[in-house]
Image (cartoon, rainbow, N blue to C red):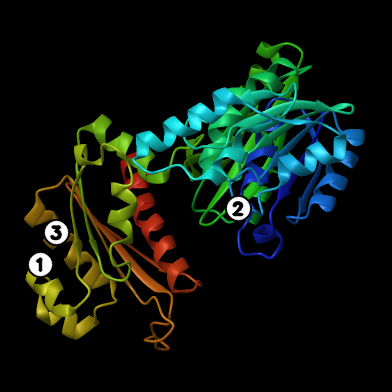
């Protein structure tokens, strides 16, 4: 099917809100084998919304519209649609009752303005909203099916997955198979160069940079689902062979999740010591559910005194080499390994900037060290990023250092 996506809202048009709904919807439409032919955004203006909807009904088989289903005066999407197609709005009593029950559950009084959220075009199908008040609406106008969905992402996701996705899947002419490979440690250009000429077995490969990683998506379509899966399996295998250890995981797996699974499998634990990242590394680790099974502790040792007191870094090492040095990173890792008893201790120290650099150690210099049963290894990197980007990249680098150590790379 040809699908159009329309987002409504003054906030989107003015740049106050970034539209994350459209790419989310487009990706799922593509996943079910349909073609998204147009994206557009429209202000909270009844005439403009109506014009966009009428045009979409002539160009697409299905139209997904987000935004403008709330209770306030500027939420006019349903009214604009009814006006544009000459439809009658009727009060849906079951929806109204569900809205009342929602406010009872959250312990707040229901406003009269919320009643408008129960107005739907006559003959339309209501799509249940389990996390908010505005239901989705499915209705045919002209030659197209319209899906009106809330703009609030978590409400949109729930209604789409529950009510729209099954409809799209049923209407797909071909089966689609998709594999997502996640890569860290190589820039996009290097990934592209290494994959030059790779045999994709009929699948298509696309790249997306989501700092600080490169995401590779392999997609195959076929009337036979088994053949589509076989194509993506073969293509993913060929890509892995080319990129090797740079591929850390698949799907929605984060680097910290991938590392955690490896540590759990080996019955090992990890401790981290951070200077320049200020807790960024520990935060990423503890974003993973169940991290307590493999993460022992984290120490944010920003000052020299804290490095000496908490990690037993010798004062003469700091005096001779400075806080940002390979020697200090090694001493931090060794001190943490000894005090924690963790299987692996990793330490990072660097210059995040924008000031504090020198000709010998410019802004962006970072040293990472890993202490394990087999000894200590250290790495020096130079990262050209702003302060926030630097912290993120260094945290990823530390996680990847541990992962590669476990792989013997």
In this picture, is 126 found above or below 268?
above
Mark toward the start of the polypeptide (1 vs 3): 1
Location of residue 5 by image quarter: top right
Image quarter where the C terminus lies is top left
Foreground mark, 1 or 3? 1
Q: What is the x, y in percent for residue 51?
A: 88, 47
Q: Nearer the viewer, residue 335 or 145?
A: 145
* For residue 151, side relative to residue 353 (left or right): right
Mark toward the start of the polypeptide (1 vs 2): 2
In this orientation, does residue 16 appear? yes
The residue pinned by badge 2 equals 209
In this picture, is 161 found above or below 315?
above
In this picture, is 287 found above or below 103?
below
SS at mark 2? Answer: strand
Alpha-carbon span between mark 3 and mark 2: 34 Å
Mark drawn on residue 310: 1
Residue at horizontal 62 percent and vertical 40 percent from the top: 116
- Report if the CB atoms under discs 1 and 3 are less than 8 Å apart: no
Mark toward the start of the polypeptide (3 vs 2): 2
Residue at horizontal 53 percent and vertical 38 percent from the top: 155
Foreground mark, 3 or 2? 2
Mark drawn on residue 336: 3
Image quarter where the N terminus lies is top right
Q: Nearer the viewer, residue 20 or 115?
A: 115
- Report if the CB atoms under discs 3 and 2 are less than 8 Å apart: no
């Amino acid at each position: 099917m040809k699908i159009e996506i329309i987002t409504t809202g003054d906030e989107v048009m003015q740049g106050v809100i970034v539209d994350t709904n459209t790419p989310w919807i487009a990706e799922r439409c593509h996943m079910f084998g349909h073609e998204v032919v147009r994206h557009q955004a429209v202000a909270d203006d009844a005439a403009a919304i109506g014009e966009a909807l009428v045009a979409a009904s002539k160009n697409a088989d299905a139209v997904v519209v987000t935004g403008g289903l709330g209770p306030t005066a500027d939420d006019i999407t349903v009214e604009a649609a009814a006006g544009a197609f000459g439809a009658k709005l009727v009060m849906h009593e079951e929806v109204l009752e569900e809205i009342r029950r929602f406010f009872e559950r959250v312990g707040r009084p229901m406003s009269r303005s919320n009643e408008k959220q129960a107005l739907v075009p006559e003959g339309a199908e209501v799509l249940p909203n389990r996390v908010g008040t505005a239901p989705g609406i499915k209705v045919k106008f002209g030659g197209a099916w319209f899906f009106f969905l809330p703009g609030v992402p978590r409400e949109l996701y729930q209604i789409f997955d529950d009510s729209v996705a099954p409809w799209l899947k049923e209407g797909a002419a071909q089966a689609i198979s998709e594999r997502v490979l996640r890569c860290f440690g190589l820039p996009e250009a290097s990934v592209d160069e290494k994959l030059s000429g790779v045999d994709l077995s009929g699948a298509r490969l696309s790249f997306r940079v989501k700092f600080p990683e490169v995401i590779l998506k392999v997609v195959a379509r076929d009337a036979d689902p088994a053949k589509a899966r076989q194509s993506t399996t073969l293509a993913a295998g060929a890509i892995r062979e080319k990129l090797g250890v740079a591929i850390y995981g698949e799907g929605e797996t984060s680097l910290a999740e991938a590392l955690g699974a490896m540590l759990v499998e080996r019955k090992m634990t990890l401790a981290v010591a951070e200077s320049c990242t200020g807790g960024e590394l520990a935060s990423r680790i503890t974003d993973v559910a169940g991290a307590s099974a493999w993460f022992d502790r984290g120490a944010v040792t920003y000052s020299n005194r804290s490095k000496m007191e908490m990690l037993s870094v010798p004062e003469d090492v700091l005096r001779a080499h400075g806080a940002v040095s390979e020697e200090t990173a090694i001493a931090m890792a060794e001190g943490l390994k000894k005090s924690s008893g963790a299987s692996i201790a990793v330490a990072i120290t660097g210059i995040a900037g924008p000031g504090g650099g020198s000709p010998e150690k410019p802004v962006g210099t970072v040293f990472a060290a890993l202490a394990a049963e087999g000894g200590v290894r250290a790495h020096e990197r130079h990262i050209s990023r702003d302060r926030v980007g630097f912290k993120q990249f260094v945290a990823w680098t530390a996680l990847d250092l541990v992962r590669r150590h476990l792989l013997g790379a």
